[in-house]
Image (cartoon, rainbow, N blue to C red):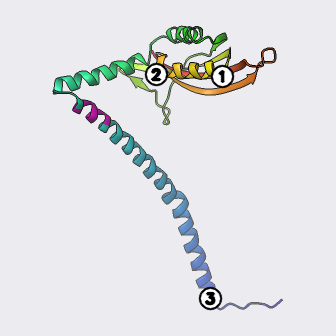
Amino acid sequence: MQNINLTITQKKIIVITFISLMVFLVFLIFIYLPSKDAFFKIKSELSENEKQIHEIEAMISKAKSREEGIALLKERLEELNNKLPSRGEESFKVLSDLARKLNVELISIQPDTKKLFVDENNNKVEVEGMFCQVVFVSLELKCFYSELTSYIKALESDLPAFVNIETLTIEKDRALASKLNVRLGLNLYLLS
C-alpha cells in the first residue's frame, strides 16, 4: 500500500466538503423534509376546504333564494346531526333490525366501552357543544354472500350513526357450505 500524502490545502478542502455535506444533511432531515410534509398536509386541508365550499355553493345555487339556500344548508346539517346520535342503543337496535330485515342471522353484538374521539393532535372532537365518542362493536353473523353485501350497504345508508368497518373476517360454514360465518368489527361515532 502506498501512503497518500495530502497537503494542508487538500486536507482543508476535504474538511470543508465534509462539513458542508453534514450541514446539507441536517438541513434536509430537520428542516426541508418536515416542512415539505407540513406543506402537503396544509395543501390537502385546503383542497378539502375548497371542496366543501364548492359543495355548499352548489347547494345554494340550486336554491331560488338565499332563504331557500340557508334552509337547504340547515337540512343538510340536520341530516349530519342525525348521523351522530347521542345514545348507542339506537344504533345497536338498528344493527339488529337491519340484520333481521335482510335475512342475516345475527349471532352476537359485543360493544366495547365508549371512548372519546380525538383528532390527530389529541384534541377532543366537539360538535355543537357535544363531544364525539367512538365505540367499537363486534358482530358475529351467519348469512349468504349476497345478504352480507346488502347488509354492509345498508349499514352505510340506514344506520343513524357514522360507521367505519374496521375488520371483516369471512369463513365458510362447515355445516352449511353455502352460508358464511362472518365477524365484523365496526366503529360507531356518537355524540354525548
Query: Earlier along the polypeptide chain: callout 1 or callout 3?
Result: 3
Give the vertical position of 169 relative to 7 (above or below): above
Horizontal arrangement in the rendering, residue 51 relative to residue 28 (left or right)? left
User: Residue 18: percent from the left, percent from the top?
Assistant: 60, 75
Q: Residue furthest right?
A: 1
- Whole-angstrom CA distance, mark 1 to mark 3, is 74 Å
Query: Earlier along the polypeptide chain: callout 2 or callout 1?
Result: 2
Total marks shown come to 3
Give the vertical position of 122 relative to 50 (above or below): above
Identify which residue, 165 or 111, lies in the foreground. 165
Disc 2 designates what residue? 132
User: Residue at image x 58%, y 69%?
Assistant: 22
Rate crowding at label 1 as few (under 14), some (14 to 19) or many (20 or more) other CA atoms within 10 Å: some
Disc 1 designates what residue? 145
Of labels 2 and 1, the one closer to you: 1
Query: In which quadrant is the C terminus drawn?
Result: top left
Rate crowding at label 3 as few (under 14), some (14 to 19) or many (20 or more) other CA atoms within 10 Å: few
Q: Amino acid at mark 1?
A: Tyr
| Res. 54 image quadrant | top left
